[in-house]
Image (spheres, rainbow, N blue to C red):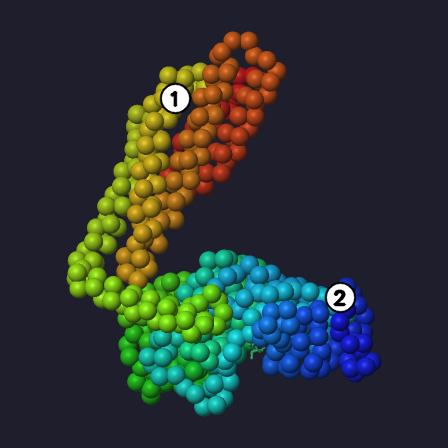
């Protein structure tokens, strides 16, 4: 659908070659042009390394404002660089498409037209923190803590999806005009965890990210470094390169009289060595303090501007919410709530340990040890199966209880995050073991039932293959690896 005006009429110097050959040079699209027969360009609002951003109106959606990002790498890029840049641009589109978070612009479209490449996303009305800083805006300590509290959950969400942003800086955080939470933009150099990287803004990048000899390795803590540095710059107005130096930072902490909490958090976020830093956004969040844990979400009704009626409902809902939460606080004093949560944690950990001990108990071990072949195991199937199923249920229950512990109880919540992965691993192992045992049981029954048809043989062989696959999936650090190995030995030589 070619609705761009023809190049010579609008004076656009179009692609030197076609996009497929990764060679593109183009001037900006004039105001009023309609692209994709849908987005009417209003003007350029941003220009960066690999693209420019236009404000556009979506003519098929009541002139909704959207941000159209056009792929426009520097003219002197050679084909290999253009190819890499295009991959990053496509990567950004895919990441925006896959992520869904109130504080990340929503993906709208990705298309090629007139040999140009475009990514359309929601337009965020507001200013970047870099623009605000240029206007002389500095954060005070409380605002800095709040900005951290607002951004850490988004970073946590991004990292949870195995993505590292790699370009956190004041230019890539927008403060919306309507007082909503800050929006994280520009996933242009974001990538999967552990991959090779290209530096985003080197001024803010963590040391290991800037280190090309190390191929610019990045971790979630690299994003935390860049966020810490951004906050430091926004608090003091100092240049990022100066804030990277610890000795200078110590002077700044004194000069601005930051409280102990903020000082400790920034210092840990900005440690040179990634190992010394916080390892996750959640860990930083836990250190902010309870007053930052439970801020009311300010989501917009239906993702669009609320009508006045909707806004009244929203106000009523918030009012009721405050009354109910206030009521609960009166009914349940904080110490009692604390004790209740601690009890849930302790009893769940106990239950999980009991479940694992049950599944590993001596009786079951002996039954497995005494069996050389599947036929030897025949008498023990029932007992082992029952035991494993019971343990599985118990462990599942413990995990469910642990998952109920709210994030805002940071201290207990962090403990939960520590124990949970191992329990989840064990639950997965136990369930694979149970399934394998059932397959063995059915196969043994078939084999001992009498004359075997070719179909029976095939089924038995398929069962053993499946058992092998199941057992292989059990991680080496699971408590059940030994049991899996033993069962594997028994099933190793299928009698048919
Ligand atoms: N979704 C958006 N809504 C409003 N403005 C945006 C949006 N995305 C980007 N911008 C503006 O365009 C600028 C450049 O966009 P960005 O995605 O950061 O590209 P680059 O990779 O070139 O830095 C931003 O600093 C911001 O001012
Ligand atoms: Mg940017």
Q: In this view, does 61 lie to the left or right of 381?
A: right
Q: Which of 161 and 305 is in front in this view?
A: 305
In this rendering, position of residue 210 left or right of residue 72: left
Image quarter (top left, top right, bottom left or bottom right) of the N terminus = bottom right
**Front position in the image: 410 or 54:** 54
Residue 234 placement, left or right of 327: right
Residue at left 51%, top 85%? Answer: 131
Which element type, helix, strand or loop, lies under badge 1? helix
| Label 2 residue SS | loop
Residue 8: image location, x then y, percent: 82, 80
> Label 1 to label 2, Cα distance in Å?
65 Å
State whether residue 421 is above or below residue 384.
Answer: below
Whichever of labels 1 and 2 marks the residue nearer the N terminus, that label is: 2
Q: Residue furthest top?
A: 450
Q: Can residue 272 be seen in this view?
A: no
Vertical side of 365 occupied by 258: above or below: below
Instruction: State the image quarter where residue 318 is shown.
Output: bottom left
Q: Residue at x 31, y 57 (%)?
A: 406
Residue at 71% across, 78% down: 33
Q: In which quarter of the image is the C terminus?
A: top right
Q: What numbered label is drawn on residue 1? A: 2
Q: Dividing the picture into quarters, in which one does residue 6 lie?
A: bottom right
Location of residue 231 by image quarter: bottom left
Q: Give x and y (percent) for residue 293.
A: 32, 67
- Regarding residue 35, the answer to whether it shows in the image is yes
Count of all numbered marks drawn on residues in the image: 2
Tell me the residue that label 1 is attached to: 381
Disc 2 CB within 8 Å of nearest ligand 1 atom: no
Task: Please name which of the two marks, 1 or 2, marks the residue nearer to the observer.
Answer: 2
Q: Position of residue 494 (x, y in %)?
A: 53, 20
């Amino acid at each position: 659908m070619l609705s761009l005006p023809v190049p010579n009429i609008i004076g656009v110097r179009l692609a030197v070659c076609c996009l497929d050959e990764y060679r593109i040079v183009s001037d900006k699209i004039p105001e009023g042009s309609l692209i994709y027969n849908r987005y009417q360009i209003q003007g350029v609002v941003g220009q960066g390394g690999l693209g420019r951003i236009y404000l556009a109106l979506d003519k098929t959606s009541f002139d909704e404002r959207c941000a159209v990002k056009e792929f426009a790498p520097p003219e002197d890029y050679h084909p290999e660089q253009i190819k890499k840049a295009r991959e990053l641009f496509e990567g950004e589109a895919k990441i925006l498409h896959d992520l869904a978070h109130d504080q990340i612009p929503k993906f709208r479209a990705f298309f090629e037209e007139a040999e140009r490449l475009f990514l359309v996303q929601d337009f965020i009305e507001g200013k970047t923190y870099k623009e605000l800083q240029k206007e002389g805006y500095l954060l005070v300590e409380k605002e800095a803590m709040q900005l951290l509290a607002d951004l850490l959950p988004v970073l946590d969400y991004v990292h949870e999806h195995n993505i590292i942003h790699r370009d956190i800086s004041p230019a890539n955080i927008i403060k919306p005009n309507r007082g909503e939470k800050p929006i994280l933009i520009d996933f242009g150099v974001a990538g999967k965890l552990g991959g090779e990287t290209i530096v985003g803004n080197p001024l803010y990048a963590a040391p290991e990210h800037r280190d090309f000899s190390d191929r610019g390795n990045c971790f979630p803590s690299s994003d935390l470094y860049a966020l810490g540095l951004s906050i430091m710059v926004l608090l003091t107005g100092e240049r990022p390169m100066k804030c990277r130096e610890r000795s200078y930072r110590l002077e700044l902490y004194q000069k601005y009289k930051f409280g102990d909490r903020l000082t400790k958090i920034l210092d840990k976020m900005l440690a040179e060595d990634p190992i010394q830093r916080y390892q996750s956004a959640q860990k930083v969040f836990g250190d902010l303090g309870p007053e930052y844990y439970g801020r009311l979400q300010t989501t917009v009704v239906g993702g669009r501007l609320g009508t006045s009626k909707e806004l009244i409902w929203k106000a009523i809902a918030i009012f009721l919410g405050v009354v109910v939460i206030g009521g609960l606080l009166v009914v349940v004093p904080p110490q009692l709530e604390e004790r209740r949560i601690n009890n849930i944690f302790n009893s769940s950990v106990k239950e999980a340990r009991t479940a694992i001990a049950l599944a590993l108990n001596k009786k079951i071990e002996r039954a497995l040890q005494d069996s050389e072949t599947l036929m030897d195991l025949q008498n023990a199937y029932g007992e082992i199966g029952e035991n494993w199923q019971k343990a599985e249920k118990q462990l599942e229950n413990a995990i469910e209880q642990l998952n109920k512990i709210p994030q805002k109880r940071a201290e207990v919540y962090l403990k939960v995050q520590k124990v949970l992965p191992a329990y989840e691993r064990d639950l997965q192992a136990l369930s694979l073991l149970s399934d394998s045992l059932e397959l063995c049981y059915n196969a043994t029954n078939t084999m001992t039932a009498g004359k075997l048809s070719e179909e029976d043989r095939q089924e038995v062989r398929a069962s053993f293959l499946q058992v092998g696959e199941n057992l292989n999936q059990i991680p080496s650090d699971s408590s059940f690896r030994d049991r899996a190995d033993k069962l594997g030995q028994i099933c190793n030589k299928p009698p048919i």
